[in-house]
Amino acid sequence: MNRSRKISLAALAVILALATVISVRKPATGAQPVELAWGDPQRLLVALGQQLADLDPRAPEAVRLSRTIASIRRKSGQTEPKAQDPGAFLEGLAQVKTGVDGRTYSPGYRTREREWALERSIGALRKGQPPNWVERGPGNVSGRARAIAVDPSDPAGDTWFVATVGGGVWLTNDAGATWSPITPQLTTLSTTSIAISQSNPDVIYVGTGMGYGRVIDLAGSGVWKSVDHGQSWSQLPNTANGELLGAINRIVVDPQNENLLLVASNNSYSYLSPNGGDRTAGIFRSADGGATWTRVFDPDAVFGSLTDNRVQQILANPLNFNTLYATVNEVGIIKSVDGGLTWAVSVDTLAPYLDGIQEGSYQGISTRIEIAP
């Protein structure tokens, strides 16, 4: 018998109901079956953990086995091991959204569902049956302001646009005394970056998606654009289905050219993520106002795959847009001197990586690097 005997939830039920003795064979060659009774759940968990370690974490068997282990812990009065990193919560949240076959919601589903809901609402109104909306909450969840942009067309500096993680973009015209939401049509209220064109303040870009955890817990819907000073918004079509990845972390716009912009973005890095855990991050550039995009930096191609590599900050020299800086998690800072067309490593020792998971290693800790002008 060369393959592991997989213990399903059904087998667990038999264990609990009949207190029977089961046999688990380790996958290692020459290993003998380990006789385990329900009276010793710890040995059972160890054996199942060994089976799980030899499986592809993305495989349906691994997902089922993980759930079996969790169920055994609950029924035996044990608690889950305390997470060693903050990404554990997001991993669990992603698992809730992922089926045992690995499938999850497809990119752009929020936009499609919103359009479908609007069609139904319009149809109901035509029939004289207005939709009856009831607020369900939650009312006890706080939000975060991830980005602030001061309106360059306001000489007093009292007009601010604020991108919030859970409530879209908000506007104040009186230096924060009062606020109003201005992005009700966005299908993703997780707005994490905002940039206003200095040469034409009517043009505003907003990036969506919360990508600072290992799993993007609030998936984005690309980049949205306003050409009327934030009164209305449209989704850039070539960003609607994950073309610029799941989270738009930062946006910079050339102060002399409203159509030249760059974004720093990344996908989830969990095996539970929609893209199967692909390590994908980078910098994307558009020279036509977001109509088309080119990937101008791929961190994995430069630094390999042992470090985090998410690009979550990008800044431009306010006096010369050709000079830009960006940060790469667990690595350092990269620099461009041609407006983002090409990039070179400026420093790669800010978060030193030590080979292997050992004391002092930054592997898997997601050491984030921030810079400021």
Image (cartoon, rainbow, N blue to C red):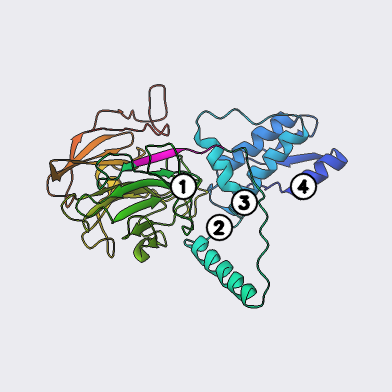
Q: Earlier in the sequence, mark 3 or mark 2?
A: 3
First-in-chain label (3 vs 1) = 3
What residue span does the magenta drawing correspond to?
Answer: 142-148
- Decide: marks 3, 2 in contact (CB < 8 A)? no
User: Which of the two labelled residues, at mark 1 and mark 2, occupies the earlier sequence position?
Assistant: 2
Q: Position of residue 309 (x, y in %)?
A: 33, 41
- Residue contact between numbered discs 4 and 2, judged by CB atoms under 8 Å: no
Tell me which amino acid carries mark 2.
Answer: Thr
Q: Quadrant of residue 130?
A: bottom right
* Helix, strand or loop under label 3: helix
Distance CA(mark 4)–CA(mark 2): 27 Å
Judge the density around disc 3: few (<14), some (14-19), many (≥20) Cα neighbours within 10 Å.
some
Q: Is residue 337 left or right of residue 188?
A: left
Q: Amino acid at mark 4?
A: Ala
- Identified at 74% across, 48% down, the residue is 9
Q: Nearer the viewer, residue 243 or 185?
A: 185
CA gap, disc 4 and disc 3 = 14 Å
Which residue is the site of mark 2? Answer: 104
Label 4 belongs to which residue? 11
